[in-house]
Image (spheres, helix red, strand yellow):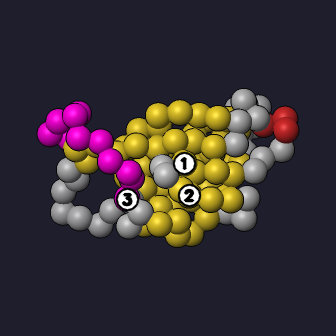
Amino acid sequence: MSVILASARIKEGNLAEHSKNVTSWKDSILSFEIDEKYKGNFVPVISHCHNVPYITSSYWIKQVGPEYIVVMQGAQDTSGRVFPPTDFTAVIVSTI
């Protein structure tokens, strides 16, 4: 059975609502604390979260560490423009 290990919302580039074990959001890195048994045994899920009439950017997970994920944002019209994420939600789900 999967368990939600951590969750967070990034709003306008800042850490907004989040679970107690999310420790920081800095330089596109979302850090969290989880039990040892879950390190390496989770899947991060991110979702665009911005109240606009149309979406012009995409988000992706660039790197996964034992207690962090690196999230990036890019323009949909070209993959060459990459910048720090501004509005998304993240959920860390266990695989065990």
Q: Secondary structure at mark 1?
A: strand
Query: Is the C-beta separation of discs 1 and 2 under 8 Å?
Result: yes
- Looking at the image, residue 89 sits to the left or right of residue 8; the answer is left
Query: What residue is drawn where x is 47% and y is 37%?
Result: 61
* Magenta stretch encompasses residue 81: yes
Query: What residue is drawn where x is 57% and y is 42%?
Result: 69
Residue behind mark 3: 86
The amino acid pointed to by label 3 is: Thr
Q: Secondary structure at mark 3?
A: loop
The amino acid pointed to by label 1 is: Ile
Q: Position of residue 90 (x, y in %)?
A: 53, 51
Q: Quadrant of the N terminus?
A: top right
Residue in the foreground of this view, choosing between 68 and 18: 68
Dot 3 alpha-carbon crowd within 10 angstroms: few under 14, some 14 to 19, many 20 or more: some
The answer to whether residue 65 is above or below residue 9 is: above
Q: Position of residue 37 (x, y in %)?
A: 84, 35
Marks 3 and 1, how far apart at CA: 12 Å
Q: Position of residue 23 (x, y in %)?
A: 68, 59
The amino acid pointed to by label 2 is: Trp
Residue behind mark 2: 25
Residue behind mark 1: 29
Mark yes or no: residue 45 visible. Answer: no
Dot 1 alpha-carbon crowd within 10 angstroms: few under 14, some 14 to 19, many 20 or more: many
Question: Which portion, as a residue range, is magenta?
Answer: 76-86
* Magenta stretch encompasses residue 40: no
Query: What residue is drawn where x is 53% and y is 33%?
Result: 63
Marks 1 and 2, how far apart at CA: 6 Å
Q: Name the residue at the left extreme.
A: 77
| Residue 3 numbered tag | none
